[in-house]
Image: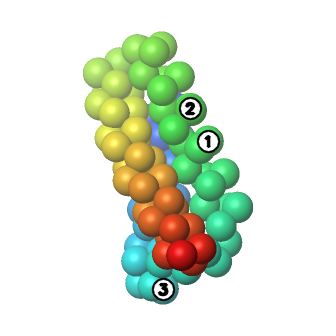
C-alpha cells in the first residue's frame, strides 16, 4: 500500500511540474500545487522514518527529491509573478 501511495504522489508531482514548465511558470492552481507538494513532502518523510522495506525507503527518497524540485518551481513561479 505504501509504495503505491508514494508512486501516486510522485506521478502527481511530475504532472504538476510538467504542467508548470509547459505553461510558462504561471501561478495557475497555486494553492493546489502547494498542497500537493507539501503533503507529498510530509508523507514521504514520514514513510522514510517508518522504514518498512527498502523499496519504500527508496521511493520515499525519490518522492522527497521530486517534491523539493516541485517546491523550487513553485517558488520560482511566485517570484516571477510578483517581480
Left or right of 12 in this view: 30: right
Q: Quadrant of the C terminus?
A: bottom right
> Pointer 3 and pointer 1: residues touching (CB < 8 Å)?
no
Residue 4 pos. (x, y %): 48, 41
Q: Is residue 80 above or below residue 51?
A: below
Residue 28 pos. (x, y %): 64, 77
Q: Is residue 42 above or below residue 76?
A: above
Residue 14 or 72: which is nearer the viewer? 72
Residue 5 pos. (x, y %): 53, 40
> Pointer 1 and pointer 2: residues touching (CB < 8 Å)?
yes
Q: Kindly indicate the quadrant of the structure image that contains residue 59.
A: top left
Comes first in the chain, label 2 or label 3: 3
- Inter-mark Cα distance, 2 to 3: 28 Å
Which mark, by number, is residue 39? 1
Comes first in the chain, label 3 or label 1: 3
Q: Is residue 17 above or below residue 39?
A: below
Let me know if residue 59 appears in the view: no
Q: Residue at x 54, y 42 (%)?
A: 40
Q: Describe the element under mark 3 as helix, strand or loop.
A: helix
Q: Which residue is mark 2?
A: 43
Left or right of 78 in this view: 19: left
Which colour scheme appears in the figure? rainbow
Q: Which residue is mark 3?
A: 23
Q: Residue at x 38, y 27 (%)?
A: 56
Mark 2: give few (<14), some (14-19) or many (20+) Cα within 10 Å: some
State the residue lying farthest toward the front.
Answer: 83
Let me know if residue 66 appears in the view: yes
- Inter-mark Cα distance, 1 to 2: 6 Å
Amino acid at each position: 500500500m505504501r509504495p503505491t501511495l508514494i508512486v501516486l504522489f510522485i506521478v502527481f508531482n511530475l504532472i504538476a511540474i510538467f504542467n508548470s514548465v509547459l505553461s510558462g511558470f504561471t501561478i495557475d492552481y497555486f494553492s493546489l500545487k502547494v498542497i500537493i507538494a507539501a503533503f507529498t513532502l510530509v508523507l514521504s518523510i514520514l514513510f522514510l522514518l517508518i522504514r518498512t522495506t527498502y523499496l519504500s525507503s527508496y521511493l520515499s527518497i525519490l518522492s522527497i527529491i521530486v517534491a523539493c524540485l516541485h517546491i523550487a518551481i513553485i517558488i520560482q513561479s511566485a517570484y516571477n509573478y510578483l517581480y
